[in-house]
Image (cartoon, rainbow, N blue to C red):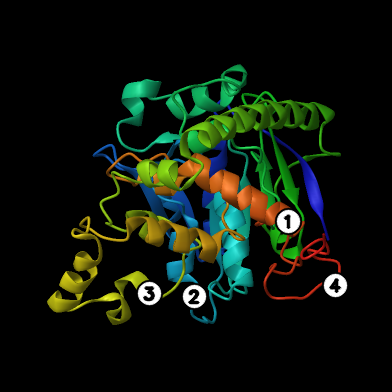
Amino acid sequence: MAVSGMLKVKDKNPEATLEELLAGWLTQGKLSAILVPVLAKSGAAGAALVSDADRIAGTAPLLPAMAVNAASVVRDIAKLRSEGTKVGVLLRPCEMRAVVELIKLRQVLADNLVLVGIDCPGTYKAAGFRDVAGTDSDFDNRHVREQQNYYDNPNLRTACQVCEHPKPMVYDLEIGFLGLDPDKELWLDGATDKGAALLEGVELAAGEEPGQMQEYLKELAARRKNKAETRIKELDEAAMGPENLTRYFADCLNCHNCMRVCPVCYCRECFFDSENFQRRLDEHVRVSKRKGLTRMPSETLLFHLTRMNHMMTSCVACGICEDSCPAGIALLPLFKKVSGNVQAEFGYLSGRSLDEELPLVGFREDEFTAIGEG
């Protein structure tokens, strides 16, 4: 049974209010543990699996920095079947979408998970984000208050500046604040039995989702969509065509970081890391003799094109690949363009629904009807 309503924020501190809520779920035994963003004493942003309610106070559920897409963590901890445990995962919208894709790809078992989605106005790169955004102890709360800055903040991660989905689409429980005054109230929506169970005993002002939330989200999505279209137009001018694309990836180190941090790049062993892709020295020489020289590391463009071909239907455009590139290659605009085009061809949006079949799993007679026609 669905349960929804407004949660009153205490002392104008939405983060402390959320911490109390999370701690209560652990104390009452509703959850065995919860995966939640944290900021270490060293200043490093990350995530932690918390099982002790007293340790929730040291977490940062509104942390405006992203070091890793937490769906990768969910994949690591929830791939194998488990008994007698129920774990909550507090995820931003792009992280939740990636988890939805991983569930459909059979890389995550959702039986023991409670999916808690939270609005995301955008995040900073984890490295040195406080140098950009400020250092006061109230920063997390200030970040969710200053909603007028979300439209055009050039310091946000590239992916966040062009993200059209700041609200989770699939969840057991949603925590919303965009379009509201988070100093006063938060929107909670228990959409499933799992989510409703977490809200048992929580004092809510019952009601429908406020209209101002919907209006704000619509405006934010429209502005970011326009910005995304501008970035993609710039990409088309700079990178389209074989020569331009080769130049675009010219600085690639072939480190495969983008693959390793991608939440939906799930193969246990990548073909490019396998023995099938390893060559003997004489084979390298033979390849080199075809043109007289071979750029080393070799076949970096083939790697990126193959990776895009492999996972574009499930790409959630989280941009963690770009953040992790030591060469600073602008991967996000290219991946957003390609994945957007591919998913549009199938009428699909990654992470939109658990019931929506993966594009390449099923066959539809009405797909690609124009192919081969004059």
Q: Which residue is mark 3?
A: 271
Q: Secondary structure at mark 1?
A: helix
Residue depicted at x 51% and y 50%: 23
Rounded to the nearest angstrom, the CA distance separating label 3 from label 4 is 32 Å
Residue under label 4: 365
How many marks the image carries: the answer is 4
In 3D space, how far apart are the residues under numbered discs 4 and 2 (Cα atoms)? 34 Å
Residue at position x 32%, y 61% from top? 299
The residue that disc 1 covers is: 345
Label 2, label 1: how far apart the Cα atoms are: 30 Å
**Which amino acid lies under the numbered mark 4 shown in the image of this protein?**
Glu
Quadrant that contains the N terminus: bottom right
Q: Nearer the viewer, mark 2 or mark 1?
A: 1
Instruction: Give the residue type at disc 2.
Output: Lys
Disc 2 from disc 3: Cα separation: 21 Å
**Amino acid type assigned to the residue bearing label 3 in the image:** Phe
Taking depth in this image into account, of 326 and 149 the one nearest to the observer is 326
Q: Position of residue 77 (x, y in %)?
A: 44, 69
Where is residue 103? Give x, y as percent: 61, 69
> Relative to 365, is 255 on the left or the right?
left
Mark with earlier residue (4, 2): 2
Nearer the observer, 239 or 122: 239
Q: CA distance from mark 1 to mark 4?
A: 14 Å
Q: Residue placed at 71% from the left, 50% from the top?
A: 169
If you read the primary sequence from the N terminus, does the residue marked by circle 2 or circle 1 appear first? 2
Instruction: Name the secondary structure under disc 4.
Output: loop
| Residue 114 visible in the picture | no
In primary-sequence order, the first of circles 2 and 3 is: 2
